[in-house]
Amino acid sequence: MTTHPLTLERVTCRLPDGRALFTDLCFTFDPIATGLVGANGVGKSVLARVLAGTQAPTSGRCHGGGRVLLLPALSGVPQGRVADLAGVGDVLDALDRIGAGQVDIEDFNRVGERWDLREQLRLQWQRAGLPADLQPEDPAARLSGGQAMQVALSGAWASGADWLILDEPSNHLDARRRAQLRHALQRWRGGLLVISHDRELLGQMACIVELDAHGLQRFGGGYTDYVHAKAAHEAAAQAQLDHARQQHRQQQRHARALHERAQQRQSRGARSARDANQAPILLGLQKQRAQASAGRHAQLQAQRLADSADRLRDASAGVTPSTQLVAFAPPSPHASQQVVRLQGMQLPHGCRAPLDLILQRGQRLAVVGDNGSGKSTLLRVLAGQLAPRAGSCDIGVPAALLDQALVTLHAGSSALATLQAACPATPIAELRTRLALLGLDAARIERTSATLAPASG
């Protein structure tokens, strides 16, 4: 397989409100395993769609690479059929029509060389440990988040694309499936661009590309090499900022000192003029020369001060701002000591073994298990959204569930409106502060949830 690079030529993308995500990007993605990183909301997912040709940029163009397949980040409950989730529903439908005796040339073009697609999918699903009775025609909603991601990945492996662009492919996968994903990516021989926060996955990339407000920057090696190079770059940028700040302060002190000396000279000159026995015309010429000289000095000093301020702004722009941590209020000391009590409880889906558990206030518990084993179902039972099949589930405190599909976020509501609906008694100023601590500025909290990056691209 000969895969060509993907090249961006002066690519700019703006949001409907006019805000620029990135401008004039000129960059070439070589057909090697590349990780794309950057802050939430910087535009990584938008850039992925531009590279895949599924979204046109505001200006500029992207070319090269052959056939590019984008696997977008999964969000919400999967819709349609399992075949559609795998991205091969149209090909399987064409195979069915051909098998029924139809001879539409478009169906043959759609199938291409993928006559054994069903067998490929069945083999991949078997290797992935998906349910043995899973069929392409089944509704995708029957799958867990991890199973849905495995199905979507199976379609990517069977696509025959020249380039794969995977947006958060390890989301929802358990540890074993993440290891399987890393091994599958090592076997891939085409171009590969992975958008991820998974450090292990990024660790096996040949290079890391970072997208930030300044554009795209390439770092050789995997994630560890990127972290070291980034730390060195940030240290150098901070040192440059400290030096620029010190020089600007010295320039400010120097400007104040010169101004004070100029005022003193002007005061002495005025006294001397009053005491001197000279003709008024000579005194006027001396005053004009002194004022002209002072004006030149003032202009020169103002320019030096402005240049110093410019250098300080440039150095400040090169330093990444630190991220604040969100501080949550501790639980009330009067809250119940027993948080959860499960006795012989059986889940309505997934694991059928009876569960017994007592969780006390202050304890923290991680729920792990294979995809499809019932982890999300257990959380929904604990949140009171589902009833257990058998046994008892007693919750001693108010419960809130943040699920992987983010069903509590309404696409048409803003982040601020959603938080207000959940916390009607909390002052709006405090809600705005909490959202700001999560990195959502005043503009983003008013935008609809559908326009926010999945992780806040």
Image (spheres, rainbow, N blue to C red):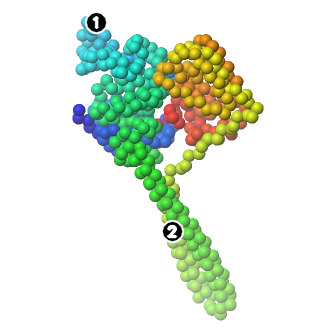
Q: Is residue 294 left or right of residue 162?
A: right
- Quadrant containing the N terminus is top left
Q: Are marks 2 and 1 in contact (CB under 8 Å)?
A: no
Residue at 36% across, 18% down: 126
Quick one: label 1, few (<14), some, or many (20+) residues within 10 Å?
few
Residue sitting nearer the eye, 186 or 57: 186
State the image coordinates of residue 116 (x, y, percent, origin top left).
Answer: 27, 16
State the image coordinates of residue 52 (x, y, percent, origin top left).
Answer: 35, 32
Residue sitting nearer the eye, 315 or 123: 123
Residue at 38% across, 30% down: 181
Which residue ends up furthest to the bottom in the rendered image?
277
Find disc 2 in the rendering and name its residue: 304
Above or below residue 104? Residue 455 is below
**What residue type is disc 2 on?**
Arg
Q: CA distance from mark 2 to mark 1?
A: 82 Å
Q: Is residue 74 left or right of residue 276?
A: left
Label 1 sits on a secondary structure element that is: loop
Find disc 1 in the rendering and name its residue: 100
State the image coordinates of residue 168 (x, y, percent, origin top left).
Answer: 44, 32
Q: Is residue 448 visible in this depiction of the protein?
A: yes
Residue at 33% across, 18% down: 123
The image quadrant that residue 60 belongs to is top left
Quick one: label 2, few (<14), some, or many (20+) residues within 10 Å?
some
Q: Is residue 436 visible in this depiction of the protein?
A: no
State the image coordinates of residue 312 (x, y, percent, origin top left).
Answer: 51, 60
**What residue type is disc 1 on?**
Ala
Which residue ends up furthest to the top in the rendered image?
100
Residue sitting nearer the eye, 416 or 388: 388
Q: Earlier in the sequence, mark 2 or mark 1?
A: 1
Above or below residue 10? Residue 274 is below
